Image (cartoon, rainbow, N blue to C red):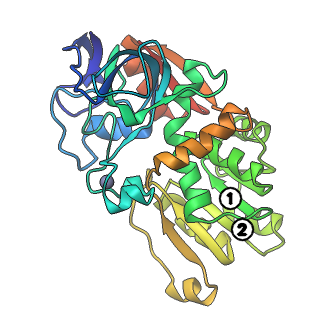
Amino acid sequence: MKAIRFHEHGGPEVLKYEDAPDPKIEANEVLVKVRACALNHLDIWLRSGVASWKLAMPHIVGSDISGEVAETGRLVKRVKPGDRVLLAPGISCGQCEMCTKGLDSACRGYTLFGVMADGGYAEYVKSPEANAIPIPGDLSFDEAAAVPLVFVTAWHMLITRARLQPGEDVLVIGAGSGVGSAAIQLAKLMGCRVITVAGSDAKLEKARALGADFGINHRTQSIADEVKRITARRGVDVIVEHVGAAVWEACFESLSAYGRLVTCGTTSGQDVQLNLRLLYGRQRALLGSFMGGRGELFDALKLIGQRKLHAVIDSVFPLAEARAAQEKMESREFFGKILLHP
Ligand SMILES: [Zn+2]
C-alpha cells in the first residue's frame, strides 16, 4: 500500500509518500480501507519527536480515521466487509479497572492510532474490532473522520471533568482549533453562554456561526478585561484551554468563584505560576483532561448523527500532500479539521 511515513524525527520534510507493507490482521481485528484521515496537533509532535513516546521507525501517524471494512478476522462478529466505519482513536485493554469504569484514557495500556499502533496516513489500517464504530446517520467519510478525537476530548473536558451545568458561562480558548470548535458547539447545546478567543476576526466570525455569543481577538484585546466586561466582573464558570503558558494568567484571572479551568494541552509552554491563595480563597478548581472514553464518543456520536453537533472541516488534501497539510496546521491559518484522502 501507499502510506506517508517518516524514518526519523524532524520537520515536515521527513514525511515520505512511499510503499509500505499491507497490514496483517489478527483474529480479533479488522482491516479498514481508509477513506479519510484528519490531522491533529499530535501528529506534528510525534513527527518532530517532542512527545515522549518511543516510536518504531518507519512510522505512520494519524489518529482520526474513517473508511470501509475490507476484511475481518475470524473472531470478529459486530462488523463485516463493506461496512462504513469510523475508528475510536484510543486503544485500551478493555478489561482493567479504569477501562471497565469507562475511563479508557487512564488505562495503563492506553495508546492511539498513530502512536504505538500504525495510523491513518495510509491506504489501509488495521484496528481492533472494538474500535470500529458504524458511521452514524448520513455522515460522509470526511465528517466521520473529523469527529472522533476532538469531540471525545471536548466531551471529556466539559461534561465529565468540568461537570458543565446548563446556563453556565464558558470561555473557550482557540476557537479555530478542532477542540475549540467542538467545545463551542457542545457548550451551546447545553444552553450555556459561550465566549471564545482567537487570533483573527475572521476566525471569530466563524466561531459565532457555530454558536459563540462573544469573540475576543487576543491580538488586539485583553482576554481578562473582555471577560470581566462581558460577565460584569463575575468571571466565567468554566474555561476550556489547551494553549498553556501564553494564556494561563488571563485564564486564571477570568475564572469566577467556584470556576473550573480544564486543560488538555500546552502548545505554548507547560510551566506556569499559580497563586494558591486565589485558588482556595475563590474555591476554584484546576482540572487536567486527556482524551476520553469510548462511551463518551458514543454519547457525542448520537448528537452528531442527529446533526445537533457538527464536524467542522477546513480543507482536504490528497494523502501524497500530507506535508503541505501539516504545514498548514503549523501556520495556524485554519479553522476546524484538515483532512487527508488516500
Ligand atoms: Zn485498560
**Mark linked to residue 171:** 1
In terms of sequence position, does the residue under pointer 1 or pointer 2 come before the other? 1
The quadrant of the rendering that contains the N terminus is top left
Q: Position of residue 17 (x, y in %)?
A: 28, 13
Q: 321 or 169: nearer the eye?
A: 169
At 27% from the left edge and 26% from the top edge, which residue is drawn?
Answer: 60
**Mark 1: secondary structure:** strand
**Mark 2: secondary structure:** strand
Alpha carbon separation for disc pair 1 and 2: 7 Å
Q: Residues within 10 Å of mark 1 (few under 14, many from 20)?
A: many
Q: 235 or 13: nearer the eye?
A: 235
Query: Relative to residue 175, is residue 54 drawn left or right?
Result: left
Q: Position of residue 82 (x, y in %)?
A: 46, 12
At 29% from the left edge and 15% from the top edge, which residue is drawn?
Answer: 3
Q: Position of residue 210 (x, y in %)?
A: 75, 39
The quadrant of the rendering that contains the C terminus is top left
Which quarter of the figure has residue 135? top right
Which quarter of the figure has residue 65? top left
Q: Position of residue 199 (x, y in %)?
A: 63, 44
Name which residue type carries label 1: Leu
**What residue does disc 2 label?**
236
